[in-house]
Amino acid sequence: MKKIRSPKQITTANAKKALRYYAAFSTEFVEDAIELLGLKPGSVILDPWNGSGTTTLVASQLGIRSIGYDLNPAVKIIAKARMANDKQLIKATSYLKAFKFTKRKLVTDLPMFDCWFNKSSIHALADLKFYVNTIEDTVVRSLIDVAVVAAIREQLIDFKSKNPAWIKVAKQESERISLNDQYLLESSLQQLLKFKGALGSYSTIATLDVANAQNLPLPDESIDAVITSPPYCTRIDYAVATMVELAWLGMTHEQVRRLRLNLIGTPTVRKASLDLVAQLPISVLSLLSEIKNHPSKASSTYYYKTFSQFFSSMQSSFRELHRVIRPDGQLCLVVQDSFYKEIPIHLSLLFQDMLNLVGFELIDSHLYPAGGLNLIHGHKSINEVALTCRKLA
Ligand SMILES: C[S@@+](CC[C@H](N)C(=O)[O-])C[C@H]1O[C@@H](n2cnc3c(N)ncnc32)[C@H](O)[C@@H]1O
């Protein structure tokens, strides 16, 4: 059986770092998975948890049609920007160079920026956003979006938290800062320069959109293969991790609150999200019962609920993948095992049982030692695993 190179990102070049998403897998992994699954131009590949779009990027480079969905609109701009070519980068740079702040009346509402900025700064940001929204080429627009967000983040140093996936917010007016708008433009241009050398020159045949993996806007049996890495079972709040992007996209506080609730793997608990637990395989039910009976604080309440919610949402996503993949179609999934306290969570084994239950059979599993996690927990058996499965006809 052919080996698949590791899903760990190994690219350290500055240019590629500029368009990097910390939850991404490597382009090398996707290249090998495409070859292993025998996918060719004419096939259709889906990534229902597309993140920064590694699957859709590599598929496009190989001339294969692909569809990438993610529930978080913030990551769609990264996935789109990664599709840009050098000509689009030149266009993005000249658009940004031509912009002048006019401080006109508020034309685009960016309500979430009140988390950090005072009113006149929000007006300046809205002025720039209005201009960017008039750019027709959505890839050029996404390049500017990513660059401006990176530049805004540079001005939010005071709101940084020790946890890299978290950002603090102003609690009162006096904490809201004033934007240095000329500096913002200059540093956005600097950010664009970083993309030089990271971009390709292939034609894009990928569809990128916002959708929920539990309810995909696709006809039955329309997909040849899925290559993906689902959300982790580690309660990372991706909506907060991308709050600046969401603010720049004009989302409201209420929309972000709903996104936080609906992302899989979220630390927030939805009401009535536990209904599907009974449909999970015995191996998952017994893990949930171990968590529920753990003596530590909140195990039987909050933690039991978040884990139940994670597994129920994943099970309904697997059911949805089974619906959209054609008979005999394949699924390649990267999974990281983890821990709850001292209880090991062998996610790769649990996912195999869950996939089996909805009608997939395992073809093979490829192991990659997860160094960091092993060191933290002093265990040798915790791995990152790529599972390949086939939909039973
Ligand atoms: C591990 S990341 C995928 C990273 C991706 N492979 C890449 O290379 O960037 C998992 C993604 O799942 C997304 N996600 C979480 N819940 C979702 C849902 N219900 N539907 C669709 N996407 C969801 C998250 O926003 C996150 O981007």
Image (cartoon, helix red, strand yellow):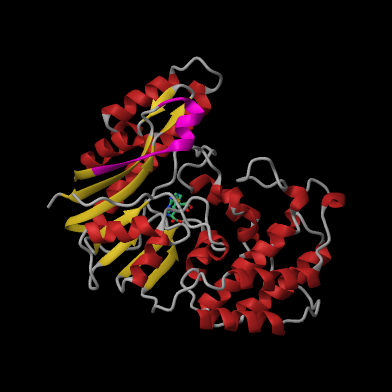
Please tell me in which quadrant of the rendered image residue 150 appears: bottom right
Residue 338 lies, with reference to residue 58, above or below; the image says above
Residue 271 lies, with reference to residue 363, above or below; the image says above
**Left or right placement of residue 252 versus residue 209 in this view:** right
x 44%, y 65%: residue: 209
Using the image as rendered, state which of residue 265 and residue 215 is in the foreground.
Answer: 265
Residue 366 image point, x, y percent: 28, 43
Residue 144 lies, with reference to residue 156, above or below; the image says below
Residue 22 image point, x, y percent: 52, 51
Q: Furthest residue to the left?
A: 393
Using the image as rendered, state which of residue 23 and residue 282 is in the foreground.
Answer: 23
Residue 269 image point, x, y percent: 52, 37
Please tell me in which quadrant of the rendered image residue 17 appears: bottom right
Using the image as rendered, state which of residue 273 and residue 330 is in the foreground.
Answer: 330
**Residue 108 appears in the picture as rendered:** no
Using the image as rendered, state which of residue 30 and residue 249 is in the foreground.
Answer: 30
Q: Furthest residue to the front?
A: 13
x 54%, y 48%: residue: 238
Badge count:
0
Please tell me in which quadrant of the rendered image residue 224 appears: bottom left
Q: Is residue 170 magenta?
A: no
x 48%, y 48%: residue: 263
**Residue 290 appears in the picture as rendered:** yes
Q: Furthest residue to the top?
A: 295
Residue 79 lies, with reference to residue 320, above or below; the image says below
**Left or right placement of residue 334 versus residue 83 in this view:** left
Specify start and end residues of the magenta stretch as a single range. 365-379
x 83%, y 47%: residue: 172
Residue 374 image point, x, y percent: 45, 31
